[in-house]
Image (cartoon, rainbow, N blue to C red):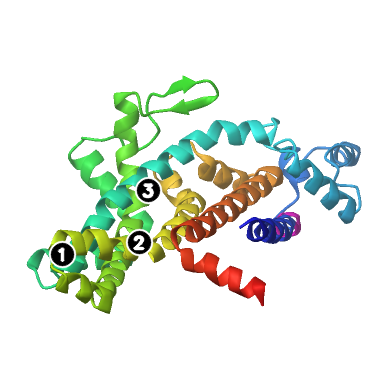
Amino acid sequence: MLSFLIRRLGQSLLVMLAVALLAFSMFRYVGDPVTSMLSQNASVEEREQLRDSLGLSEPLYVQFSTFVVQAAQGDFGISYRNQRPVSELIAERMPATLELVAVAFVISLLVGVPMGVYSALKPHSWLSHVFQTLSLIGISLPTFVTGILLILTFSVTLNWLPSFGRGEVVNIGWWSTGLFTASGLKSLILPGIMLGLFQVTLIMRLVRAEMMEVLRTDYIRFARARGLSNRAVNFGHALKNTLMPVITIIGLQLGAMIAFAIITETVFQWPGMGFLFIQAVSFVDIPVMSAYLLLVSLIFVVINMIVDMMYFMLDPRLCADRGTANSH
């Protein structure tokens, strides 16, 4: 387990260095920040002075090495647009994004897993066909269309829920949350559904397919032949083994939800990291864009490591195979 963890840490470090190089190279060619920060009437001396203060006059390899060292320390520089440390901006926006992703993740699990289990156990029932139809619609519809339909229905027509913003929040130290206020909870419902809807359909279809495959295996037939109840067979044996591949997909999708919350945050004007990134793109705010890409990549790497470790803990065969390979 220790050697596996060390190897994964080394691989993760190489991945983060590659992402850092990609972010540094790509965002250096999206525009000139000096042009965005100064007026058109600025003199050449003012432009050169600002370029020197931003470190843009240094050779590229010096800029990249400085960028990597500072990023490893959590220092992503100063935002060109807000003239504030990028780490402060991200710390302010991160609670909103993580709260939104957590709500969408819970919705996807609480709805997707039961729908998948029911569809696998009763594949020919009318409700199972309804679930299949809804999942097909959920996968086919673009995310922003779903958000617009939700706003049109529940905000414009019914006037039940707010169509934008985060509502009233409570500060707990540096962390802000809307889970303890009525307006905050109402504001979370529509974007949470929009972000979690695709995950619901994906998890439902995956659980259904995996569980139907497991129910056809020999050990399930043997468990039924032993006289075990349907409840014990379906939930004690079949569902437990079904969740192994589901863990991988759920882990990867959790990172994807954080990365692609940009669309949801833009549609609902949600003050999270994704919305900050969209604003940074508009103003060619390179430090913010680079920090966002590195942070999302780090989240993906950490989630992948956690999923791999959970596989080792949940499936003893992996440990046995590793031990056999090492002995040879």
The residue most toward the left is 126
Q: Residue 243's mark?
A: 2
Give amino acid for label 1.
Answer: Leu
What is the C-alpha distance between the residues marked 3 and 1? 33 Å
Q: Quadrant of residue 246?
A: bottom left
Q: Which residue does the numbered mark 1 point to in the structure image? A: 228
What is the C-alpha distance between the residues marked 1 and 2? 21 Å
Image location of residue 3, percent across then percent down: 67, 59
In the structure shown, which secondary structural element does the residue marked by tag 1 occupy?
Answer: loop
Image location of residue 254, percent across then percent down: 45, 53
Magenta stretch contains residue 89: no
Quadrant where the N terminus lies?
Answer: bottom right
What is the C-alpha distance between the residues marked 3 and 2? 16 Å
Q: Marks 2 and 1: in contact by CB < 8 Å?
A: no
Up the image or down, 247 lies above or below 62; here it is below
Q: In this rendering, would 233 be left or right of 322?
A: left
Give amino acid for label 3.
Answer: Phe
Give amino acid for label 2.
Answer: Leu
Give the class, few, some or many, for how many residues have Cα within 10 Å of label 2's Cα (few <14, many ≥20).
some
Which residue is more in the foreground, 74 or 231?
231
The magenta region covers 21-28
Up the image or down, 269 lies above or below 222; here it is above
Which residue is more in the foreground, 204 or 178?
204
Q: Earlier in the sequence, mark 3 or mark 1?
A: 3
Q: Earlier in the sequence, mark 3 or mark 2?
A: 3
Q: Residue 105's mark?
A: 3
- Residue at the (56%, 41%) spot, across then down: 276
Q: In this rendering, would 41 be left or right of 306?
A: right
Q: Name the magenta segment's main secondary structure.
A: helix
Depth check, mark 3 against mark 2: the one in front is 2
